[in-house]
Image: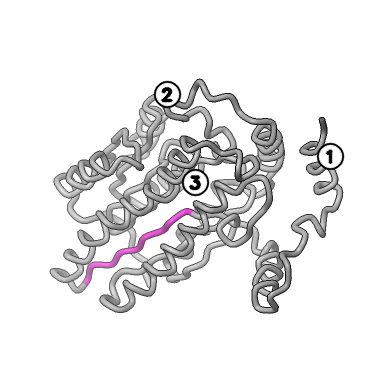
Amino acid sequence: MISDFKNKTAVLTGAASGFGLECARIAAQKGMNIVMVDVQQDALDKAAAEIRALGADVLAVRVDVSDAAAMENLADQVQAKFGAPNFVFNNAGVGSGGLIWENSVKDWDWVLGVNVWGVVHGVRLFTPMMLAAAKKDPAFQGHIVNTASMAGLLNPPNMGIYNVSKHAVVSLSETLYQDLALVTDQISASVLCPFFVPTGISQSHRNRPTEMKSEKPTRSQLIGQAMSDKAVGSGKVTAAQVAHKVFDAIAANQFYIYSHPQSIGSVQTRLEDIVQARNPTDPFVHKPELGVELKKALRAD
């Protein structure tokens, strides 16, 4: 149970917007040192200025989290300035949809690079630093939060590349939780599984790598983008509310963090499909009009 956040250090990837920025705001209010990491320099500069104005000691670093060498350099900078972090929020993520066979190799490289390798690098680099600090100091407490998605527990159609990446993050996080429990009582982990929450995720294409700019989206990708924009934009739960849930979960050592607990029924249905070896349930069973609309759009000549 962690109750004292003051003067502790938090590393946040994807810190210039969405959950990352909201968590940084809370961390600043709690008197923490904050390492803000993002790939978008202008947004990072603006966010870091805001968090510094709240009185926090901020290290802001532009990093592509999929880049192993850049992440290693980040870890070195964190160690040099603050020592081992107490909290790591592997939060950076990008969204991408479309029929699963229509995603290009570059699409796969980009989404898995950020969503999976970004978390892998955060875990492989910061966990050993935290464990070393815990060994030296019995009072050291730490927690790692990996941002997945409800798409890491479900498999909604026409967004397969995103589903694959987020299922990987859930699996990695569950394993991390179990592995940490084997070796320490001072550090634990959580996985954040938000549903549709207004953040910058639906506009991820703004940060597509330069070599992908020339790729034209397929029709299914455009349809997926439009549906995602609508769902994310109309979300009633805010990123700030989710960020508060994250800090509450850290304090309570709660592993699964949901923005929309009411959506767990769909996860239960999926697990029952698996247990009973029945074919996957229609994901639009509660909103059949959405399924009709998507089928019609995808089958149109």
How far apart, in angstroms, are the residues tagged by discs 1 and 3?
Answer: 34 Å
**Residue 97: where, in percent of width, then height?**
61, 41
Which of the two discs, 1 and 3, labels the residue nearer the N terminus? 3
| Res 25 seen here | no
Stretch of the chain drawn in magenta: 139-147
**Residue 147: where, in percent of width, then height?**
47, 53
Can you tell which of label 3 and label 2 is closer to the viewer?
2
Identify residue for label 3: 19
Nearer to us in this view, 154 or 230: 154
Which of the two discs, 1 and 2, labels the residue nearer the N terminus? 2
Q: For the residue labelled by badge 3, is the local secondary structure a helix, a strand or a loop?
A: helix
Mark 2: few/some/many CA within 10 Å (<14, 14-19, 20+): few
Color theme of the render: one colour
In the rendered structure, which amino acid carries the disc numbered 3? Phe
Looking at the rendered structure, which numbered label has been put on residue 210? Answer: 2
Q: In this view, does 232 lie above or below 169?
A: above
Mark 3: few/some/many CA within 10 Å (<14, 14-19, 20+): many
Tell me what residue is drawn at x 40 percent, y 45 percent.
24
Q: In this view, does 119 lie to the left or right of 154?
A: left
Q: For the residue labelled by badge 1, is the local secondary structure a helix, a strand or a loop?
A: helix
Which of the two discs, 3 and 2, labels the residue nearer the N terminus? 3
Q: In this view, does 280 lie above or below 220?
A: below
Looking at the rendered structure, which numbered label has been put on residue 296? Answer: 1
Nearer to us in this view, 66 or 137: 66
Tell me what residue is drawn at x 70 percent, y 72 percent.
273
How far apart, in angstroms, are the residues tagged by discs 3 and 2?
Answer: 25 Å
Looking at the rendered structure, which numbered label has been put on residue 220? Answer: none
